[in-house]
Image (cartoon, rainbow, N blue to C red):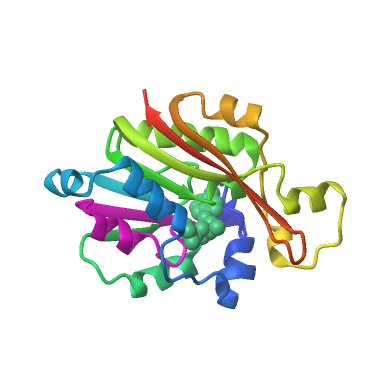
Amino acid sequence: MAKYDNKSFDYKWEQKIYKKKLHINKYPFDQVVSLTNKFFKKQKIKNKNEFALELGCGSGNNLNFLREFGFRKVFGIDGSKTAVAIAKKFIYKSNIKISNSDFIKIPFKNNFFKLCLDRGSITHNKKENIIKILGEVNRCLKKNGFFFSIIFSKADQLYKDKINKKKIIKVEQDLETTFLSLNEVKKIYSMFKIVYLVHELRINKIDNIKKAMWIVVGKKK
Ligand SMILES: C[S@@+](CC[C@H](N)C(=O)[O-])C[C@H]1O[C@@H](n2cnc3c(N)ncnc32)[C@H](O)[C@@H]1O
Protein backbone atom coordinates (compact mmCIF):
# COMPACT_ATOMS: atom_id res chain seq x y z
CA MET A 1 0.00 0.00 0.00
CA ALA A 2 3.09 2.24 -0.25
CA LYS A 3 1.60 4.26 -3.10
CA TYR A 4 -1.03 5.62 -0.69
CA ASP A 5 1.48 6.72 1.97
CA ASN A 6 1.25 10.38 3.00
CA LYS A 7 -2.24 10.57 1.56
CA SER A 8 -5.53 10.93 3.30
CA PHE A 9 -7.60 8.42 1.32
CA ASP A 10 -8.72 5.35 3.27
CA TYR A 11 -7.87 2.42 1.00
CA LYS A 12 -10.76 0.39 2.51
CA TRP A 13 -13.04 2.26 0.12
CA GLU A 14 -11.24 0.55 -2.72
CA GLN A 15 -10.82 -2.91 -1.20
CA LYS A 16 -13.95 -3.36 0.89
CA ILE A 17 -16.49 -1.21 -0.91
CA TYR A 18 -16.02 -0.59 -4.63
CA LYS A 19 -14.07 -3.78 -5.49
CA LYS A 20 -16.97 -5.67 -3.89
CA LYS A 21 -19.46 -3.66 -5.96
CA LEU A 22 -20.95 -1.98 -2.87
CA HIS A 23 -22.16 1.66 -2.74
CA ILE A 24 -22.78 1.81 -6.48
CA ASN A 25 -25.29 4.66 -6.53
CA LYS A 26 -27.03 5.67 -9.71
CA TYR A 27 -29.12 8.66 -8.77
CA PRO A 28 -28.24 12.02 -7.21
CA PHE A 29 -28.75 12.34 -3.46
CA ASP A 30 -31.82 14.29 -2.30
CA GLN A 31 -29.74 16.89 -0.41
CA VAL A 32 -27.56 17.51 -3.48
CA VAL A 33 -30.64 18.26 -5.59
CA SER A 34 -32.32 20.45 -2.98
CA LEU A 35 -29.19 22.45 -2.09
CA THR A 36 -28.37 23.08 -5.76
CA ASN A 37 -31.94 24.23 -6.37
CA LYS A 38 -31.82 26.44 -3.31
CA PHE A 39 -28.50 28.17 -3.96
CA PHE A 40 -28.32 28.34 -7.77
CA LYS A 41 -30.71 29.69 -10.32
CA LYS A 42 -30.72 27.17 -13.16
CA GLN A 43 -30.92 29.71 -16.00
CA LYS A 44 -28.24 31.96 -14.51
CA ILE A 45 -25.79 29.07 -14.20
CA LYS A 46 -26.52 27.96 -17.78
CA ASN A 47 -25.70 31.41 -19.14
CA LYS A 48 -22.35 31.57 -17.39
CA ASN A 49 -19.13 29.66 -17.68
CA GLU A 50 -19.34 28.08 -14.24
CA PHE A 51 -17.55 24.89 -13.18
CA ALA A 52 -18.41 22.46 -10.39
CA LEU A 53 -16.28 19.87 -8.57
CA GLU A 54 -17.42 16.87 -6.57
CA LEU A 55 -15.02 15.56 -3.95
CA GLY A 56 -15.51 11.81 -3.73
CA CYS A 57 -17.74 11.34 -6.78
CA GLY A 58 -17.95 7.57 -6.16
CA SER A 59 -19.87 5.89 -8.98
CA GLY A 60 -20.72 9.31 -10.47
CA ASN A 61 -24.35 9.59 -9.37
CA ASN A 62 -24.28 13.34 -8.65
CA LEU A 63 -22.21 14.38 -11.67
CA ASN A 64 -24.79 13.99 -14.44
CA PHE A 65 -27.26 15.97 -12.33
CA LEU A 66 -24.84 18.91 -11.84
CA ARG A 67 -24.10 19.01 -15.56
CA GLU A 68 -27.78 18.78 -16.41
CA PHE A 69 -28.51 21.59 -13.97
CA GLY A 70 -26.33 23.86 -16.07
CA PHE A 71 -22.72 23.90 -14.89
CA ARG A 72 -20.62 24.24 -18.05
CA LYS A 73 -18.06 21.69 -16.90
CA VAL A 74 -18.28 19.23 -14.03
CA PHE A 75 -15.29 17.50 -12.45
CA GLY A 76 -15.23 14.56 -10.06
CA ILE A 77 -12.30 13.21 -8.09
CA ASP A 78 -12.10 10.01 -6.08
CA GLY A 79 -9.30 8.07 -4.40
CA SER A 80 -10.72 4.74 -5.54
CA LYS A 81 -9.55 3.64 -9.00
CA THR A 82 -12.45 1.19 -9.20
CA ALA A 83 -15.00 3.91 -8.44
CA VAL A 84 -13.42 6.16 -11.06
CA ALA A 85 -13.64 3.37 -13.66
CA ILE A 86 -17.31 2.73 -12.77
CA ALA A 87 -18.13 6.45 -12.89
CA LYS A 88 -16.46 6.91 -16.27
CA LYS A 89 -18.71 4.19 -17.71
CA PHE A 90 -21.79 5.57 -16.04
CA ILE A 91 -21.47 9.20 -17.20
CA TYR A 92 -23.80 10.02 -20.07
CA LYS A 93 -23.43 13.81 -20.33
CA SER A 94 -20.64 15.69 -22.13
CA ASN A 95 -18.07 17.87 -20.33
CA ILE A 96 -17.71 15.70 -17.25
CA LYS A 97 -14.16 14.81 -16.27
CA ILE A 98 -13.32 12.27 -13.58
CA SER A 99 -9.92 11.55 -12.11
CA ASN A 100 -8.25 9.46 -9.47
CA SER A 101 -6.90 11.88 -6.85
CA ASP A 102 -6.62 12.38 -3.14
CA PHE A 103 -8.44 15.36 -1.58
CA ILE A 104 -5.31 16.29 0.36
CA LYS A 105 -4.05 17.96 -2.81
CA ILE A 106 -6.91 18.92 -5.12
CA PRO A 107 -5.50 18.89 -8.66
CA PHE A 108 -7.01 22.17 -9.85
CA LYS A 109 -5.87 25.77 -9.98
CA ASN A 110 -6.87 28.54 -7.57
CA ASN A 111 -10.24 30.33 -7.86
CA PHE A 112 -11.60 27.83 -10.40
CA PHE A 113 -14.95 26.49 -9.17
CA LYS A 114 -18.30 28.09 -8.49
CA LEU A 115 -19.32 24.98 -6.53
CA CYS A 116 -17.46 22.31 -4.58
CA LEU A 117 -19.64 19.45 -3.42
CA ASP A 118 -18.86 17.03 -0.62
CA ARG A 119 -21.72 14.58 -0.10
CA GLY A 120 -20.44 12.52 2.80
CA SER A 121 -16.88 12.26 1.48
CA ILE A 122 -14.50 14.37 3.55
CA THR A 123 -16.15 13.00 6.70
CA HIS A 124 -14.26 9.76 5.86
CA ASN A 125 -10.90 11.35 6.63
CA LYS A 126 -9.00 12.07 9.83
CA LYS A 127 -9.90 15.38 11.46
CA GLU A 128 -6.43 16.88 10.93
CA ASN A 129 -6.67 16.02 7.23
CA ILE A 130 -10.19 17.46 6.95
CA ILE A 131 -8.76 20.80 8.08
CA LYS A 132 -6.13 20.61 5.31
CA ILE A 133 -8.74 19.51 2.75
CA LEU A 134 -10.98 22.48 3.59
CA GLY A 135 -7.97 24.73 2.91
CA GLU A 136 -7.68 23.08 -0.51
CA VAL A 137 -11.40 23.57 -1.20
CA ASN A 138 -11.09 27.23 -0.25
CA ARG A 139 -8.13 27.64 -2.59
CA CYS A 140 -9.96 26.12 -5.59
CA LEU A 141 -13.22 28.03 -5.08
CA LYS A 142 -13.87 31.36 -6.77
CA LYS A 143 -14.70 34.30 -4.52
CA ASN A 144 -18.34 33.87 -3.43
CA GLY A 145 -18.21 30.29 -4.71
CA PHE A 146 -20.22 27.75 -2.72
CA PHE A 147 -19.10 24.75 -0.72
CA PHE A 148 -21.82 22.19 0.02
CA SER A 149 -20.61 19.81 2.68
CA ILE A 150 -22.51 16.96 4.31
CA ILE A 151 -20.60 15.57 7.23
CA PHE A 152 -21.35 13.16 10.09
CA SER A 153 -22.57 14.50 13.43
CA LYS A 154 -21.73 13.04 16.82
CA ALA A 155 -25.44 12.25 17.21
CA ASP A 156 -25.09 9.50 14.60
CA GLN A 157 -25.49 5.85 15.61
CA LEU A 158 -22.09 4.99 14.14
CA TYR A 159 -20.42 7.42 16.54
CA LYS A 160 -22.28 5.99 19.52
CA ASP A 161 -21.30 2.47 18.45
CA LYS A 162 -17.70 3.59 18.04
CA ILE A 163 -17.37 5.11 21.51
CA ASN A 164 -19.13 2.09 23.01
CA LYS A 165 -16.59 -0.07 21.15
CA LYS A 166 -19.37 -2.09 19.59
CA LYS A 167 -18.20 -5.08 17.59
CA ILE A 168 -17.67 -4.23 13.91
CA ILE A 169 -20.21 -6.07 11.80
CA LYS A 170 -20.82 -3.75 8.88
CA VAL A 171 -18.00 -2.49 6.66
CA GLU A 172 -19.28 1.10 7.18
CA GLN A 173 -18.33 0.84 10.87
CA ASP A 174 -14.75 0.12 9.88
CA LEU A 175 -14.17 3.09 7.56
CA GLU A 176 -12.11 6.04 8.74
CA THR A 177 -14.81 8.50 9.88
CA THR A 178 -14.81 11.85 11.66
CA PHE A 179 -17.93 12.92 13.57
CA LEU A 180 -18.33 16.57 14.57
CA SER A 181 -20.16 18.55 17.23
CA LEU A 182 -21.77 21.90 16.42
CA ASN A 183 -18.83 23.81 17.91
CA GLU A 184 -16.35 21.77 15.89
CA VAL A 185 -18.31 22.46 12.68
CA LYS A 186 -18.31 26.20 13.40
CA LYS A 187 -14.58 26.17 14.08
CA ILE A 188 -13.44 23.94 11.23
CA TYR A 189 -15.54 25.70 8.58
CA SER A 190 -14.76 29.20 9.85
CA MET A 191 -12.60 30.04 6.81
CA PHE A 192 -15.90 30.14 4.88
CA LYS A 193 -18.86 32.44 5.44
CA ILE A 194 -21.41 29.89 6.67
CA VAL A 195 -24.76 30.71 5.04
CA TYR A 196 -26.68 27.54 5.91
CA LEU A 197 -26.16 25.07 8.73
CA VAL A 198 -28.66 22.32 9.39
CA HIS A 199 -28.52 19.34 11.70
CA GLU A 200 -30.41 16.56 9.99
CA LEU A 201 -31.41 13.78 12.35
CA ARG A 202 -33.37 10.85 10.99
CA ILE A 203 -34.58 8.25 13.44
CA ASN A 204 -35.81 4.98 12.04
CA LYS A 205 -38.72 4.15 14.33
CA ILE A 206 -38.49 0.48 13.41
CA ASP A 207 -35.03 -0.14 14.87
CA ASN A 208 -34.38 3.28 16.50
CA ILE A 209 -31.18 3.76 14.52
CA LYS A 210 -30.19 7.42 14.26
CA LYS A 211 -28.58 8.92 11.20
CA ALA A 212 -27.27 12.40 11.89
CA MET A 213 -25.48 14.70 9.49
CA TRP A 214 -24.48 18.37 9.36
CA ILE A 215 -25.46 20.09 6.15
CA VAL A 216 -23.11 23.02 5.75
CA VAL A 217 -23.11 25.62 3.02
CA GLY A 218 -20.12 27.92 3.06
CA LYS A 219 -19.22 30.75 0.71
CA LYS A 220 -15.65 31.67 -0.07
CA LYS A 221 -14.90 34.97 1.67
C1 LIG B 1 -19.90 8.25 0.93
S1 LIG B 1 -19.03 8.11 -0.58
C2 LIG B 1 -19.88 9.37 -1.51
C3 LIG B 1 -20.05 8.99 -2.96
C4 LIG B 1 -20.90 10.00 -3.76
N1 LIG B 1 -20.46 11.34 -3.55
C5 LIG B 1 -22.38 9.91 -3.40
O1 LIG B 1 -22.96 10.94 -3.03
O2 LIG B 1 -22.95 8.83 -3.54
C6 LIG B 1 -17.46 8.89 -0.21
C7 LIG B 1 -16.46 8.89 -1.37
O3 LIG B 1 -15.33 9.69 -1.04
C8 LIG B 1 -14.13 9.05 -1.47
N2 LIG B 1 -13.04 9.55 -0.62
C9 LIG B 1 -13.05 9.65 0.75
N3 LIG B 1 -11.89 10.22 1.17
C10 LIG B 1 -11.15 10.50 0.06
C11 LIG B 1 -9.88 11.10 -0.14
N4 LIG B 1 -9.12 11.52 0.87
N5 LIG B 1 -9.44 11.25 -1.41
C12 LIG B 1 -10.20 10.82 -2.45
N6 LIG B 1 -11.40 10.23 -2.32
C13 LIG B 1 -11.88 10.06 -1.08
C14 LIG B 1 -14.44 7.56 -1.33
O4 LIG B 1 -13.63 6.78 -2.18
C15 LIG B 1 -15.93 7.51 -1.71
O5 LIG B 1 -16.10 7.27 -3.08
Q: How many marks?
A: 0
Q: On the picture, is 56 further left or further right than 130?
A: left
Viewer-proximal residue, 36 or 94? 36
Q: Residue at x 41, y 47 (%)?
A: 117
Asked where in the image residue 175 lies, by quadrant, the reply is bottom right
> Residue 105: where, in percent of width, then height?
45, 41
Whether 206 is among the magenta residues is no
On the image, the x and y values in percent for residue 97 come to 29, 59
Q: Position of residue 18 (x, y in %)?
A: 55, 70
Residue range in magenta is 55-79
Q: Nearer the viewer, residue 106 or 26?
A: 26
Eyeballing the image, is 44 above or below 157? above
**Does the segment drawn in magenta span residue 73?**
yes
Q: Is residue 186 left or right of residue 169?
A: left
Q: Quadrant of the N terminus?
A: bottom right
Q: Can residue 56 be spotted in the picture?
A: no
Q: Please identify the quarter of the rendering in which residue 113 is found.
A: top left
Specify the quadrant of the image occupied by residue 195: top left
Q: From the viewer's side, name the closer residue of 96 and 31.
A: 31
Residue ID at (71%, 42%):
154
| Residue 127 visible | yes
Looking at the picture, does residue 49 appear above or below residue 96? Answer: above
Report the residue at 57% width, 26% height from top: 186
x and y percentages locating residue 100 in the rendered image: 42, 58
Front in this rendered view, residue 97 or 59: 59
Residue visible at 55% across and 77% down in the picture: 21
